[in-house]
Amino acid sequence: MTVMYFDTIAPSTKLALLESGFLFAAGDCSNHFIYRFTSLGGESELGISNSSKGFEEAKIINDHSQLVKFCPRADHQNLEICDELQNLACITDMVVEDLVGQGSNQIYLTCGKANHGTLR
C-alpha cells in the first residue's frame, strides 16, 4: 500500500473544489479558509508506504511495527491561504461585561475548540 500526503487543513464541515484552482474549506469549529493550489503534489514528493504484502490482523495487534505512522506537516506545501472568513461557530461561552473600564459593556466570546479556539 502506498499513501501520498498532500497537505493538512483544519477539520472542515464542507469542502468546495473550484475549477479556477481554489479550495473553500468551511471550518468545523474554526475560521473558514479559501486556499489556492500552488501545485498538485507531483510524483517526486515523499509518500508513506508499507510494502508488507498480505499482513495478518492478528499479528498487527501484537506487533505494531507493521503500522504506518503519520505526522502531518505544520506548513502547507501545495496550498496557499488566500482569504480567511471569521467564524463564530461553536460559541462555547459568552460574557457581557465592562472588563476594560470604558463605561460601556462589551461582548466577549470564546469560540472553537482545541488549538483552533479563540477569545473574541
Image (cartoon, helix red, strand yellow):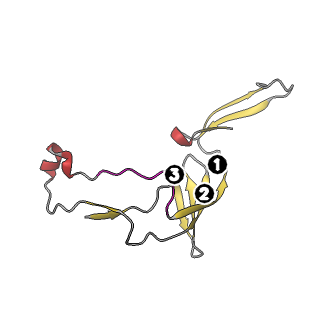
Magenta segment includes 49: no
**As drawn, is 42 to the left or to the right of 118?**
left
Alpha carbon of mark 2 to alpha carbon of mark 1: how far? 10 Å
Alpha carbon of mark 3 to alpha carbon of mark 2: how far? 9 Å
User: Residue 88's spot in the image, x, y percent?
Assistant: 65, 44
Q: In this view, does 38 lie above or below 112?
A: below
Circle number at residue 21: none
The amino acid pointed to by label 2 is Phe
Based on the displayed image, in which of its 4 quarters is residue 53 positioned? Answer: bottom left
Alpha carbon of mark 3 to alpha carbon of mark 1: how far? 13 Å
Q: Mark 2 points at which residue?
A: 33
What is the secondary structure assignment of the residue under circle 1?
loop
Furthest residue toward bottom: 19
Give the residue drawn at x 54%, y 63%.
79
User: Residue 68's spot in the image, x, y percent?
Assistant: 27, 53
Q: Mark 1 points at which residue?
A: 87
The amino acid pointed to by label 1 is Asn
Give the residue drawn at x 54%, y 49%.
28
**As drawn, is 11 to the left or to the right of 88?**
left
**Contact, mark 2 vs mark 1 (Cβ under 8 Å):** no
User: What residue span does the magenta drawing correspond to?
Assistant: 69-77
Q: Is residue 52 above or below residue 98?
A: below
User: Residue 82's spot in the image, x, y percent?
Assistant: 64, 62
Q: Residues within 10 Å of mark 1 (few under 14, many from 20)?
A: some
Magenta-colored segment: predominant secondary structure: loop
The amino acid pointed to by label 3 is Ala
Q: Is residue 90 above or below residue 98?
A: below
Q: Which of marks 2 and 1 is in front?
A: 2
Furthest residue toward front: 44
**Contact, mark 3 vs mark 2 (Cβ under 8 Å):** yes
Circle number at residue 10: 3
Give the residue drawn at x 24%, y 51%.
67
